Image (spheres, rainbow, N blue to C red):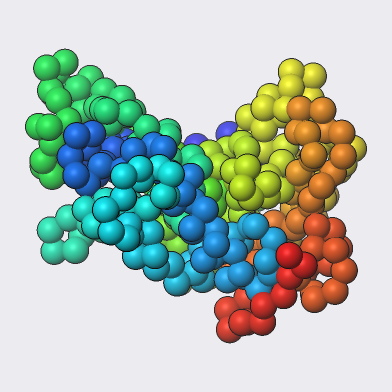
């Protein structure tokens, strides 16, 4: 709306689709409620689900390293989690009942309404460690319910049990605060603006592919008009990054590149990337390099320390590649060394490598 305000923008896990996102926040919680229903998956089972997803999906990128680089390449079979016989303790067994598997299918499926109208993307395979944001309570998150009560104006007595699809129409009609981003970035591009956009693939708060959906809608609007998105807009998916900061302990994926909120997660005295304060490792410095010197980043190197608070020893680094390319292991050398990876189109590759 205001293309002249900034020369460069770094946008991380953006909540850009307000009219649908807030209701999706609530809808995800509703899939798993009420807590006394047979289909409810208790929070204690989230780690078992995440472990099975990691077991099935880790090698889908060609490397066994406890990181799911691209969930879209994993042919996940939820039925492997089905309990066998009369299980006395599901948490110990790490299994799900048939009604709970139905809930899992809802969580991993896009939200669609009548006539297959797409509303919002699904939670991603590998996001299970972050599910407590939306699924860890006996009520849907107030991000959704308070939106309906106080922003859409249905009042404090409204409850999530009163939900019906007409709320979508109301939300779209009101468009509160005009806070849903449009797709026409032509004016921003023409004035020389630059946009670096990223989203964690383990985000349990905002579905990762809402960002990919936005990118593709901008592409559909501008490419037919002669715009090359790479000239001003670059999108990066971050394997193992949860909502803005952190990574599941089961993955220990490189997640730190000085994105929004990340320095504060390490400590109050942290700035940039400790030990790697340069445009190759710091997304904001990469943006400055692009805006001020015309050098656009094809990748950003993400870092993981043995102790993120102390930043004592780097255990893993990996390039985050500009979409649609992905990081591909070259087949030799330490898989935790970014020098042994390259950015390329991965589809069609099915060679399995690994060191564990």
Residue 21 falls left or right of residue 274: left
Q: Nearer the viewer, residue 83 or 25?
A: 83
Q: Nearer the viewer, residue 127 or 12?
A: 127
Q: Nearer the viewer, residue 196 or 294?
A: 196
Residue 117 falls left or right of residue 200: left
The answer to whether residue 103 is above or below residue 79 is above
The answer to whether residue 65 is above or below residue 251 is below
The answer to whether residue 150 is seen in the rendering is yes
Residue 37: x and y in percent read 17, 39
Q: Quadrant of the C terminus?
A: bottom right
Q: Nearer the viewer, residue 226 or 47?
A: 47
Q: Residue at x 9, y 32 (%)?
A: 162
The answer to whether residue 7 is seen in the rendering is no
Residue 289: x and y in percent read 80, 47
Q: Quadrant of the N terminus?
A: top left
Q: Residue furthest top?
A: 156
Q: Residue at x 21, y 28 (%)?
A: 148
Residue 307: x and y in percent read 78, 34
Q: Residue at x 22, y 37 (%)?
A: 33
Residue 257 falls left or right of residue 15: right
Residue 252: x and y in percent read 68, 46
Residue 248 falls left or right of residue 298: left
Q: How many discs appear?
A: 0
Q: Residue furthest right?
A: 275
Q: Residue at x 79, y 52 (%)?
A: 317
The answer to whether residue 60 is above or below residue 46 is below
């Amino acid at each position: 709306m205001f293309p002249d305000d900034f020369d460069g923008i770094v946008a991380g896990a953006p909540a850009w689709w307000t009219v649908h996102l807030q209701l999706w926040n609530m809808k995800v919680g509703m899939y798993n409620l009420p807590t006394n229903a047979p289909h409810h998956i208790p929070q204690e089972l989230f780690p078992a689900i995440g472990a099975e997803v990691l077991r099935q999906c880790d090698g889908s990128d060609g490397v066994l390293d406890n990181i799911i680089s691209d969930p879209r390449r994993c042919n996940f079979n939820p039925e492997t989690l089905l309990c066998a016989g009369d299980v006395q303790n599901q948490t110990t067994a790490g299994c799900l009942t048939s009604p709970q598997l139905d809930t899992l299918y809802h969580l991993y499926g896009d939200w669609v309404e009548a006539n297959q109208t797409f509303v919002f993307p699904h939670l991603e395979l590998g996001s299970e460690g972050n599910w407590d944001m939306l699924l860890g309570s006996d009520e849907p998150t107030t991000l959704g319910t308070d939106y309906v009560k106080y922003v859409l104006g249905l009042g404090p007595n409204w409850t999530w049990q009163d939900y019906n699809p007409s709320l979508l129409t109301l939300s779209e009609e009101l468009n509160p605060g005009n806070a849903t981003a449009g797709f026409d970035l032509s004016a921003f591009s023409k004035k020389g603006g630059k946009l670096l956009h990223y989203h964690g693939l383990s985000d349990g708060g905002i579905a990762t592919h809402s960002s990919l959906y936005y990118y593709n809608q901008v592409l559909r609007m501008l490419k037919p008009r002669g715009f090359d998105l790479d000239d001003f807009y670059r999108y990066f998916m971050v394997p193992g990054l949860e909502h803005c900061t952190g990574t599941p302990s089961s993955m220990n994926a490189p997640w730190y590149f000085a994105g929004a909120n990340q320095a504060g997660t390490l400590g109050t005295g942290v700035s940039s990337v400790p030990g790697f304060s340069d445009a190759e490792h710091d997304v904001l410095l990469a943006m400055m390099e692009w805006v001020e010197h015309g050098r656009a980043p094809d990748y950003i190197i993400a870092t993981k320390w043995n102790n993120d608070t102390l930043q004592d020893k780097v255990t893993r680094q990996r390039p985050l590649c500009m979409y649609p390319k992905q990081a591909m292991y070259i087949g030799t050398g330490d898989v935790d060394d970014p020098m042994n990876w390259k950015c390329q189109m991965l589809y069609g590759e099915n060679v399995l490598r690994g060191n564990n």
